Image (spheres, rainbow, N blue to C red):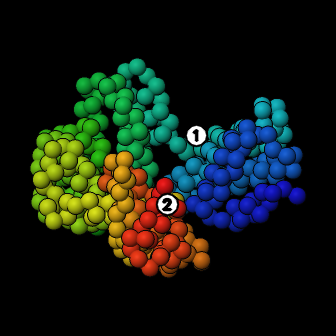
Amino acid sequence: MSKFDELITTAEGAGIKERKQFVHFMLNTIQQTRGKLDSEDKEALLNFAYGQVEEFLKTIPEAKCYKEKDQIFEVEDMVLGMIMGLCPSPAAIPEENLMKIRALTALVDSERKIETALDSIFQQESITDTDVNRLLYWVKQSDDEYQRSVMYAGILHYRGQLSKFTKEAVAKLSEHIHGELRRILAMETIPGEALDALEILCDVCKLFPAEDTASLLTQVFSLGQNRISYYAVETLLSLGKEPPKAVVEALAKDLFHANLIHGTLTHYGQAGLFPAELANEEYLAKSDLVHWLCYPTELGREPDEIDYIGKIKYLFKKEVYHVFKYRSDSDTLGDDLRGKWLIGWSSVDGGTFSNFDEFEKFDLGNTEKTLKNIKKKLIG
């Protein structure tokens, strides 16, 4: 019996999003041990991985949209990493399973045409307009908004290599990006995945600005979507344009974006645009903690309630930590923590963290004593 049996059973019964976390844990275990596991554990993990390969060969073609396929691709990559970590060479893989792995690799490559084309052109020393046309050919073949946006995310990934583009290639890509902005903004009702694409477009267009970039971004603000407005504001600032005061205020009042937009405005020398009444350490630290808690590995969303406890100062350090208690009924919390007050902290310069520690276990009935207790036992 393997010590991974229970974990494997849970992973096999989970959806692809949840399964990703389990597979990530298994892969990390294999990497940390360099594949040197007990024979029973190794066999259990390999059998799980081979079973996933067989399942993916069926589920990828059956997926309803490219977003579903992309989620499978992420897990597929880690599953193949598990096999490679446990088997020193292809010769150690049974022939039947090796054939299935090769079939899966070929299937994924055939689906990821945009990603493959993008990776290919960035391997070159110079990228011409012909290369861009080859990339755009695959983008225009798809009517799936999520799949089309893969190119924008890929460009952001390779942003450090944009000098490879010739002047003509930049012009061609800029024309396409701004054409996509106009296309989505012209929709009577913009569906969710098109909004997701618009969010990335507002970010990537700063790398390929055009004459109508600012006017298009102004139209974006009318949607009232803070997550999109944030990138539109950042792009305007990068172009030396001042964003609308009302948009900045809306972002400043949004706890998820407040610290982000304050940092962005400061970076571009426009901190004065941030509402003065909100430009204080406590509020910005609270915003930073909320942003942290929204990560999928934490709460996955904003807490239902969050209250300020106080701040912790160090005598010989510059750090000042603002400590909060919050509660949530997020599914990422166990039944023993859901709805209870938990502790989190943040400094304006970083150091944001929460390990879901229960507030009542550190509460000494007095704010000063409670903060000292939290400092000693949690923050250090």
| Mark 2: secondary structure | helix
Q: Is residue 377 left or right of residue 57?
A: left
What whole-number distance in Å separates the C-alpha atoms at marks 2 and 1?
52 Å
- Residue in view at x 36 percent, y 74 percent: 307
Q: Quadrant of the N terminus?
A: bottom right
Q: Is residue 255 left or right of residue 85?
A: left
Q: Amino acid at mark 1?
A: Asp
In the rendered image, residue 75, in percent from the top left (x then y), is placed at 61, 51
| Few, some or many residues within 10 Å of mark 2 (<14, 14–19, 20+) | few
Please tell me which residue lies in front, 106 or 29. 29
In the rendered image, residue 355, in percent from the top left (x then y), is placed at 52, 62
Q: Amino acid at mark 2?
A: Lys
Judging by the rendered image, the residue that carries numbered circle 1 is: 109
Judging by the rendered image, the residue that carries numbered circle 2 is: 376
In the rendered image, residue 45, in percent from the top left (x then y), is placed at 77, 50
- Residue in view at x 29 percent, y 36 percent: 173
Seen in the picture, residue 30 relative to 188 is either above or below; the reply is: above
Please tell me which residue lies in front, 204 or 141. 204
Can I make out residue 149 in this image?
yes
